[in-house]
Every structure is written in structure tokens, then in C-alpha cells.
Amino acid sequence: MTRKLPIAGLIIVMVFVAGYAEPLCVNAGQANVRTGPGTGYKIVWEVYRHMPFAKVGVSLSGSWYAVQDVDGDVNWIHKGLVTSSYRCAIVKSKTANIRTGPGLLYAEKFTEPAKKYDTFRVLKKKGAWVKVRDEYRDNGWIYGKLLWIH
């Protein structure tokens, strides 16, 4: 008798190596995150430029990445929509003030703070502060503990 492997076992190659997950950033203006590795799977989230993810797996074809988000959910994104060439951050607190420099003595840059799930490209770090750029190319500093950087 021939034994058949479950399809799921043929589709995914998970890469949990000593807790390491490769950081990825969405580098497309808009991207669909799906329940499985392919366009036939349901879209669970539409994300935008600078969304950070942790790559935790790869499809057997190598075209799709299993990615974990700030909330710990794991879904799938096409590899052509992400990059590992720079780091990204997402606000994990309810709000986060964006300042003109790395510290509380610097003025708030905008009248409205960043909100939970706002995303940024990480430019540099100075102590506990992170210099970020938003999708409109505005720069500012956010206290690092308010961000999830991956």
C-alpha cells in the first residue's frame, strides 16, 4: 500500500533555527497578506510600504514567505513584495510621539502622534531612540520601546 503525504507537508518548508527569523520589509506601495502560499488563498490583510515582518518559513517553490507580524500571527506574502536590505518598524503602543531629535527635550514634529500599526523605515538608532522615515518621506525620532522592529 502506498502512503500519501498531506499536501501541507509538501507546500511549506519552515525555517525555525534557534529562534532566528529573518527581518523583512514590504517594499511595494501595497501588498496582500494571505492565508497560504499562493494567489488562490484568502487575503487576510492589505499592508503598505514599510510594514515589518519576521520571515519564519518558505514555500517549497521558494516564491512565498511565511511571515510573522507584530501580533504574532503567521501568514504568507509573495517574496517580490518584500526586502531584507533595510529594517522597518511598526508602532506597537496606542500612540507614539514623533520628535525632531532623539530625546524628550526635542519638540514634537507633528500635531498628531503616530498611531498603533503606523509603519516606518528605520534610518538609524541613537541610544533608546530610532530615527524613522514614513511613506511620505518625512523623518523623525520615536522612542524605541514604542516600536516593533524586525
Image: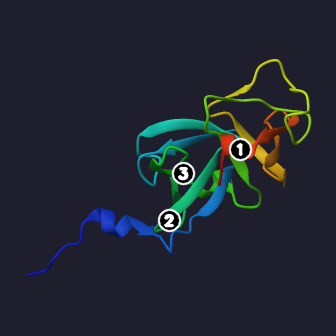
- Give the mark nearer the N terminus: 1 vs 2: 1
Q: Are marks 2 and 3 in contact (CB under 8 Å)?
A: no
For the residues labelled 2 and 3, the Cα–Cα distance comes to: 10 Å
For the residues labelled 1 and 2, the Cα–Cα distance comes to: 20 Å
Q: Residue at x 86, y 37 (%)?
A: 140
Residue type indicated by callout 2: Val
Kindly report which numbered mark, 1 or 2, lies closer to the viewer in this rendering.
Answer: 1
Q: Which mark is residue 77?
A: 3
Image coordinates of residue 19 in percent, x first then y, are: 51, 69
Label 2 neighbour load within 10 Å: few <14, some 14-19, many 20+: many
Residue 48, above or below 68: above
- Give the mark nearer the N terminus: 2 vs 3: 2
Identify the secondary structure beneath mark 2: strand
Q: Quick check: 130 left or right of 72?
A: right
For the residues labelled 3 and 1, the Cα–Cα distance comes to: 14 Å
Residue type indicated by callout 3: Ile
Identify the secondary structure beneath mark 3: strand
Q: Which of 105 and 150 is in front in this view?
A: 105
Image coordinates of residue 49 in percent, x first then y, are: 71, 41
Identify the secondary structure beneath mark 1: loop
Q: Find disc 1 in the rendering and name its residue.
A: 50
Residue at far left of view = 1
